[in-house]
Amino acid sequence: MSAHIWSKKEEIESLTMERPHLVILGAGASYASFPNGDKNGKKLPLMSNFVQILGLEELLEENNIHAPYNDFEALYSDITVDETKQGLKEEIEKRIQNYFYSLELPDSPTLYDHLVLSLRPKDVIATFNWDPFLAQAIMRNISIIEKPPTILFLHGNVTYAYCAECKVGYPLKDKCIECGEPLLSAPLLYPVKEKNYQTHPVIKAHWKGFEHYLKQAWAVTIFGYSAPKTDVEAIDIMKKAWGETEKRNLEQIEIIDIQEEKRLIETWSPFIHTHHYDVHRSFYESIIAKFPRRSGEALWAQLMECKWLDSQGFPQDANFSELYRNIIPKLEVEYRKQKS
């Protein structure tokens, strides 16, 4: 029986999977990561409580827009097409930008730190979220991992700005490193009635990258993204990039969400080949968390070599030093391969 167990030594030494593990983050990922708010207790809003969390009620009432405010996307869409409310539109966008930019990671390690540390440079995180947590987690762990996974901001992000002249973008910076000019921000909000990710060059580029990596992915983890019916263009792009499920008969889909499993499978059935999926209620049940930096190899060992997997992954309450000790043996193997 021991011959069929994927040992800890194999886990550390195995470095064979070159195809990316693609992680798609939705609002549910940040909400699950910070149920009590950020470092200072600021809450993460969902579309159903967005107006209340950001304190927009008075502003809307002043502009003759009355409760209920349980569908912010639809509300914003209506404001966008009303030529008499363009001043209100700009004020809402400014307040959203300021609120999300003010959010801070707690000082102790978070789920986002675990996620960033768990992926290799070949892997990809595509996020629909505006919050700064992903960029902040990368910046405070970059000294240990050196090269983070590729990050794609599909709806823009408060930390991400770009130089139109040099055609480069940077998180958490104000000026272009190459030419010194002030950086520009990509839009965060898109009217639900006419979402078009091709109109802005930066957003278009991130979606093109997303399509490319989705085609190449060996595994896809969908974390807290509900694929809302209002986001028709996003789902169409994803379906076209993924292709026919009959031709993706080896790839694995992993869903992390608190919704009922039956409903999740119905939502993501266009991407699932027969039994090639897993559903988890917590990130820490995922293949990424259980086998940091070796998720692709672990899936191969399990699905293709029929080996038993046995790993605890990151201790959830570990401090940064303990987290780094956990992955340093794997990092050393990666560095050796890079030099060879």
Image (cartoon, helix red, strand yellow):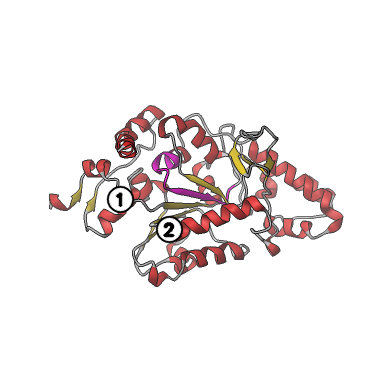
- Return the x and y of residue 4 as percentages of the image width and height: 16, 53
The image quadrant that residue 276 belongs to is bottom left
- Rate crowding at label 2 as few (under 14), some (14 to 19) or many (20 or more) other CA atoms within 10 Å: some
The image's mark for residue 316 is: none
- Tell me the kind of residue under disc 2: Gln
- Return the x and y of residue 336 as percentages of the image width and height: 30, 36
Q: Answer whether residue 276 is magenta in the image.
A: no
Q: Answer whether residue 119 is magenta in the image.
A: yes
Q: Is residue 39 left or right of residue 251?
A: right
Residue in view at x 41 percent, y 34 percent: 145
Q: Nearer the viewer, residue 13 or 65?
A: 13
Residue in view at x 26 percent, y 45 percent: 14
Disc 2: which residue: 216
- Return the x and y of residue 225 as percentages of the image width and height: 52, 56
How many circles with numbers are drawn on the protein?
2
Nearer the observer: mark 1 or 2; the answer is 2
Residue in view at x 66 percent, y 44 percent: 53
- Residue at disc 1, secondary structure: helix
- Residue at disc 2, secondary structure: helix
Q: Which residues are magenta?
A: 114-129
The answer for how far apart the CA atoms under marks 1 and 2 are is 16 Å
Where, quadrant-wise, is the C terminus in this rendering? Answer: top left
Disc 1: which residue: 297
- Tell me the kind of residue under disc 1: Glu
Q: Is residue 55 left or right of residue 27?
A: right
